Image (cartoon, helix red, strand yellow):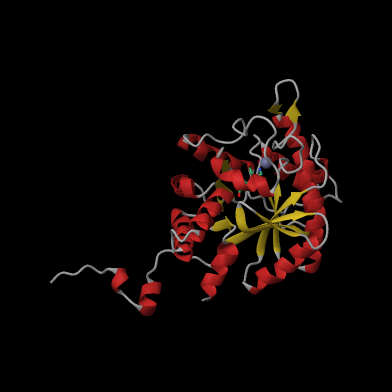
Amino acid sequence: MFQRFRRTRLNGHLRSLVRETNVSVNDFIYPLFVRSGEGIKTEVASMPGVFQMSIDEVLKECDELKKLGLYSIILFGIPDVKDSIGSDSLCEHGIIASAIRRVKEKHPDMFVVTDLCFCEYTDHGHCGIIDEENETVNNDATLEISGQQAIIHAKAGADMIAPSGMMDGIIETLRNALDEAGFENLPIMAYSTKFASGYYGPFRDVAESTPSFGDRASYQMDPANRREAIAESISDEAQGADILMVKPALAYLDIVREIKDNTSLPMAVYNVSGEYAMLKMAGAQDLIDYDRVVMETMISFKRAGADIIISYHAKEVAKMLQK
Ligand code: PBG
Ligand code: ZN
C-alpha cells in the first residue's frame, strides 16, 4: 500500500537530519538593562526573570551567559538624570558608555550590541528631540545627535550599533558618521521595520521610558500596512544597513518572510517584552506547557526566516537546548 514519507514517523538521527528548522544558542541576542550603582539587581514586575542591573551585576551576568553558550547581548541604559535631549547618552561617562567599556574590558569575548535611541534618556520619553510648538519629534535634529550617540558607543567599544528610533535617514546618517570617525567596519543592525505596538508595554516599565505625552505613531509603522513595512526595510538596506529587523516578532511573521525573500541581508526579529510577558504569565498559571510553547515560538521565528532572535527567553532556551 502507498505510504507517504512522513518525517514525523522517523526516529533518531534521520529525523533530525531531515528537520527543516533548527534553533541554536548561536541564534540569540540577550537584552540587558543597566543602571548606575552597585549590587543592584531589581526584577521587573511585569517581566519575571528580567532585571535592571548595575554594571557589576552585568559583569557577573556575562559569566553566567557564557556558561550557557550565549555570547551576544544588547545593552539598554537607564540614566540617573533625564533631560530634553538625552544628554546622558551623548556623554562618554554616561551609563551606556560606561557599561560598554566595562563589559568589553572584563569580557572581550562578548559581542556587545547597543540600542541607539533617546527615549530611555529623555525626560519626555520620546525617541528624539521634541519641537516645543507642535509636540512632535524633529527628525533632522534627532539625526544630528544620533550620529554623536553612535560615536560614543563606538569609542566605548561597541561591536554593533542598533538604532531603534525609526527616524527617516538614520542608517545613512550613522553610516557616514561612523565612517568619518574611523569606524568603517562597525556593523549597523537597523530596527528597520518597527511597528507602533502595544506589545512594548512591559519594556517601558523596565526602561522607564513611557512617553509623557502622545505616542510613537508618528515615527513607528502602522500595523495594518504590509507594503509600507517591506519598503522601510528595503530602504534601510539601500542606506547601508548590515542586518535588518522586524519588531515585534510574533504578530508580524508574514512581514519577516516577505522581507527575507526580498533581501540578501541577514534578518533579525525582536521577540518583545509583551510577547515574553504573555507566555510567562500563562506559564505561571499552568495554562500552557511553558517550555514547549517557548521552543515552538522560537522555531516559528526561524521558520519565518529570522537568522537572529533578540529575546528575553534566550537564557531559558539555552538551558533547554543543553538538555
Ligand atoms: C527604544 C526601544 C523600545 C524597544 C526596544 N528599543 C521601546 C519602544 O520603542 O517603545 C521595545 C522592546 C521590547 O518591548 O521588548 N526605542
Ligand atoms: Zn526609542
- Residue 75 x, y percent position in the rendering: 71, 55
- Residue 139 x, y percent position in the rendering: 70, 31
- Residue 254 x, y percent position in the rendering: 43, 46
The vertical placement of 72 against 257, above or below, is: below
Residue at left 60%, top 44%?
Answer: 201
Residue 316 visible in the current orientation: yes
Q: Nearer the viewer, residue 99 or 226?
A: 99
In the image, is 7 to the left or to the right of 211? left
| Outermost residue to the right | 93
In the image, is 6 to the left or to the right of 171? left
Instruction: Identify the image quadrant of residue 174.
Output: top right
Residue at left 12%, top 72%?
Answer: 1
Residue at left 79%, top 68%?
Answer: 106
Instruction: Identify the image quadrant of residue 52.
Output: bottom right
Q: Nearer the viewer, residue 214 or 16?
A: 214
| Outermost residue to the bottom | 12
